[in-house]
Image (cartoon, grey):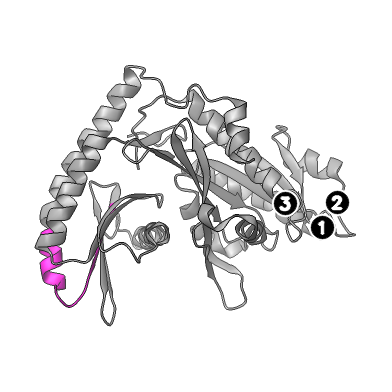
Amino acid sequence: MSSSHSSTFVMYDEELRKINMVSEKLLREANAKVIFLVDKNGQLITSVGETEHLDTTSLASLTAGNIAATGGLAKLIGEKEFSILFHEGEKDNIHISIVGGRVILVVIFDTRSSLGLVRLRVKKASDDYGQIFEDLAKKAAQEDKDGVPSPFAEITDDDIDNLFS
Amino acid sequence: MSFINYASREINCKIVYYGPGLCGKTTNLQFVYQKTSPDAKGKMISLATETERTLFFDFLPLALGEIRGFKTRFHLYTVPGQVFYDASRKLILKGVDGVVFVADSQEERLDANIESMENLKVNLEEQGYQLDKLPFVIQYNKRDLPNVTSMEELRSLLNPNNVPEYEACATTGEGVFETLKAVAKLILMELKKGGAGGGAMG
């Protein structure tokens, strides 16, 4: 995994479908309200559950900030990272964990579930997510190697200027 | 690191506004927020102290429209400019696709600008980036004030590589969109160079 600035994270239909299947299952089995996946840079990958009244973009950005800040704390005390964060509210709680070493899994749940159940189910789902993201990385690397052209290879100055008109 | 989502046909990019304390990074974002139509923007988040100094970051998601069938989304972040928030600044640079350096044109802030620019380079290098290889633009802010350093001097001290540069007054919005447009353009040009895969994360 390089982290050069030119690298791009790619998501395809097939993998997204698989990810959403794992999320739906986790949502059911953990009795959760919402589940979303965010990349460590704060970009929302996908969400399932009761998301209609949620500002998922802001949630994604703040979650990544949260993980980044606690990751910084971890390093200060000699830990690699804190792989699980839990925020307890009066009604709703947030369980945040890192899956596959690179993606943030967020589970929002209320009194219909419990921390123990969520932890258990998240642990199980993490392996499934991890496998999908590993396959995804391989697929993207292969496409890169094969020289599949970027959909943006053909963009023109006019295309870009039009965005701002 | 941009995120191309073929499933939802979206492209997400991260722009970070860097610069010394009180140079106008948050003001830039606030102006963009005010002047953008509601359907093109999300909520602006400011994690600030009680005295409205940025504590962790400001965040503004923008949707600029479609390009080749892909919705383009830019996530704008500011860093906290005050020297002692360096640990937070490093975190926000993670995964950056383009950088705007906002310089404070006032004479008494000349040293602070130079220090912040050095800090940007060091922090980027720590993350494995090189400033001269990233989409990068400079904004000379507060040009409306009486005690400003000349453009020649600012240029020679802050912009040896001749990256795109803009004079601005972020409070009135002068130069704000020009700066944003320039960095967005550089990022999209960078995407044009890249392949469809890449796949590297984290």
Q: Which chain carries label 3?
A: B
**Magenta span contains residue A119:** yes
**Whether labels 3 and 2 share one chain:** yes
Kind of residue at disc 3: Ala
At 26% across and 73% down in the image, what residue appears?
Answer: A93
Q: Which of marks 2 and 1 is nearer the N terminus?
A: 1
Q: Residue A148 carries which label?
A: none
Neighbour tally class for label 3: few under 14, some 14-19, many 20 plus, Cα within 10 Å: many
The residue wearing badge 2 is B149
Please report the bounds of the magenta region as a residue range: A104-122
Q: How far apart are marks 3 and 2 (CA)?
A: 11 Å
The residue wearing badge 3 is B103
Q: Which of marks 3 and 2 is nearer the N terminus?
A: 3
At 59% across and 47% down in the image, what residue appears?
Answer: B120
Do residues under tags 2 and 1 come within 8 Å of each other at their CB atoms? Answer: yes
Which quarter of the image is occupied by the C terminus of chain B?
Answer: top left
**Whether labels 3 and 1 share one chain:** yes
Q: Is residue A90 visible?
A: yes
Which quarter of the image is occupied by the N terminus of chain B?
Answer: top left
Kind of residue at disc 1: Gln
Q: Please state the horizontal and vertical placement of residue A129, each as a whole percent of the image.
A: 18, 46
Splitting the image into 4 quarters, where does residue A78 fall? bottom left
Horizontally, residue A46 falls left or right of residue B115, namely left
**Magenta span contains residue B92:** no
Q: Mark 2 lies on which chain?
A: B
The residue wearing badge 1 is B106
Q: Mark 1 lies on which chain?
A: B
Kind of residue at disc 2: Thr
Query: Up-down: is B6 above or below B50?
Result: above
Q: Secondary structure beneath disc 3?
A: strand
